[in-house]
């Protein structure tokens, strides 16, 4: 069974940093593109970033370029999102998602809430 | 960036009725690059349709997708109580992924 479990969310002040983790199991992690997608509470979905299986290619939505970094550890089946210079508008539930061909998000974690507030 | 616009914003129907949800793209996209997701309160999204027409694993055959170019549709032939949720379309025609704003399907 595919499982994706996020951790690392919480409350952070504007300008601060936070690192999200996603533990993957039930599939061959090292063979899959992976992604982060966020959702402002009560609002719609926004793709944040995705990363190639070997980590050699990474793509970001414009609003997080230069502030967020997606990375992965294939030896430990883990995906990460390093978030720096956080802003109030980054407040959201962050989902880890596995990418099928497309990219299509075929499996999602339960989400981690990040709140940016003073 | 390709913008996806969903219509209607809210659709009020009764169980047993047919639901038709629309998704328009700001420019033409390949049918292979259009997907639909279902999201219930407090849950993560769930893939329903990919490649415009292919049902994801475990999705009942009352769900169907169609369309091409800039105009795509998700149809639920006979609504069951568990189908009431928010539905999002998503495109991945380039390295940038975008979602529509969602259609809330509510019980009338």
Image (cartoon, coloured by chain):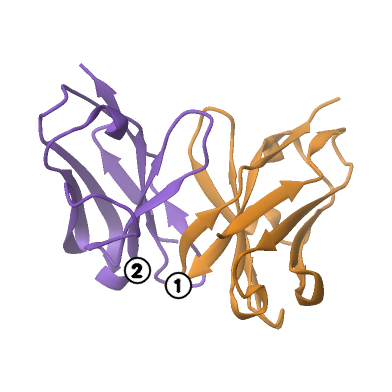
Chain colours: A orange, B purple
Give me the chain letter of mark 2: B
For the residues tagged 1 and 2, is the chain the same? Answer: yes
Q: Note whether B73 is above or below B19 in the view shown.
A: below
Q: x%, y% of residue A42?
A: 52, 27
Callout 1–callout 2 Cβ contact below 8 Å: no
Q: Secondary structure at mark 1?
A: loop
Q: Nearer the viewer, residue A116 or A21?
A: A21
Q: What residue sits right under mark 2 in the picture?
A: B33
The residue depicted at 50 percent of the width and 32 percent of the height is A43
The residue depicted at 52 percent of the width and 42 percent of the height is B44
Q: Note whether A95 is above or below A35 in the view shown.
A: above
Disc 1 or disc 2, which is closer to the eye? 2
Q: x%, y% of residue A63?
A: 65, 52
Specify few, some or many for label 1: CA neighbours under 10 Å numbering under 14, 14-19, or 20 or more.
few
Q: What residue sits right under mark 1 in the picture?
A: B94
**N-terminal label among 1 and 2:** 2
The residue depicted at 43 percent of the width and 33 percent of the height is B40
Q: Secondary structure at mark 2?
A: helix
Is residue B30 something one can see in this rendering?
Answer: no
Q: Nearer the viewer, residue A109 or B13?
A: A109
Residue A104 located left or right of residue A38: left
Q: x%, y% of residue A116?
A: 78, 33
> Which image quadrant is residue A62 in?
bottom right
> Which image quadrant is residue B54 in?
bottom left
Give me the chain letter of mark 1: B
Residue B104 located left or right of residue A85: left
Image disc number at residue A107: none
What is the C-alpha distance between the residues marked 1 and 2?
Answer: 9 Å
Q: Note whether B23 is above or below B55 in the view shown.
A: above
Is residue A76 something one can see in this rendering?
Answer: yes
Q: Note whether A106 is above or below A118 in the view shown.
A: below
The residue depicted at 57 percent of the width and 60 percent of the height is A2
């Amino acid at each position: 069974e595919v499982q994706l479990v996020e951790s690392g969310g919480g409350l952070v002040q504007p300008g601060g940093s936070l690192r999200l983790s996603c533990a993957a199991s039930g599939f061959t992690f090292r063979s899959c593109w992976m992604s982060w997608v966020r959702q402002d509470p009560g609002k719609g979905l926004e793709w944040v970033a995705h990363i190639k299986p070997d980590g050699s290619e990474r793509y970001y939505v414009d609003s997080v370029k230069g502030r967020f970094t997606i990375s992965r550890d294939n030896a430990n089946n883990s995906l990460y999102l390093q978030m720096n210079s956080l802003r109030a508008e980054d407040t959201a539930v962050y989902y880890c998602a596995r990418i099928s061909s497309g990219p299509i998000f075929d499996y999602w974690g339960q989400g981690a809430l990040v709140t940016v507030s003073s | 960036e390709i913008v996806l616009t969903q219509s209607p914003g809210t659709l009020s129907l009764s169980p047993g009725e047919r639901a038709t949800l629309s998704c328009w793209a700001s420019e033409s996209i390949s049918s292979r690059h259009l997907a639909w997701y279902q999201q219930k309160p407090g849950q993560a999204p769930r893939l329903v349709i990919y490649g415009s027409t292919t049902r994801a694993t475990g999705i009942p055959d009352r769900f169907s997708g169609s369309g091409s170019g800039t105009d795509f549709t998700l149809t639920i032939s006979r609504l069951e109580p568990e189908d009431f949720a928010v539905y999002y379309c998503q495109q991945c025609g380039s390295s940038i992924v975008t979602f529509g704003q969602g259609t809330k399907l509510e019980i009338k």
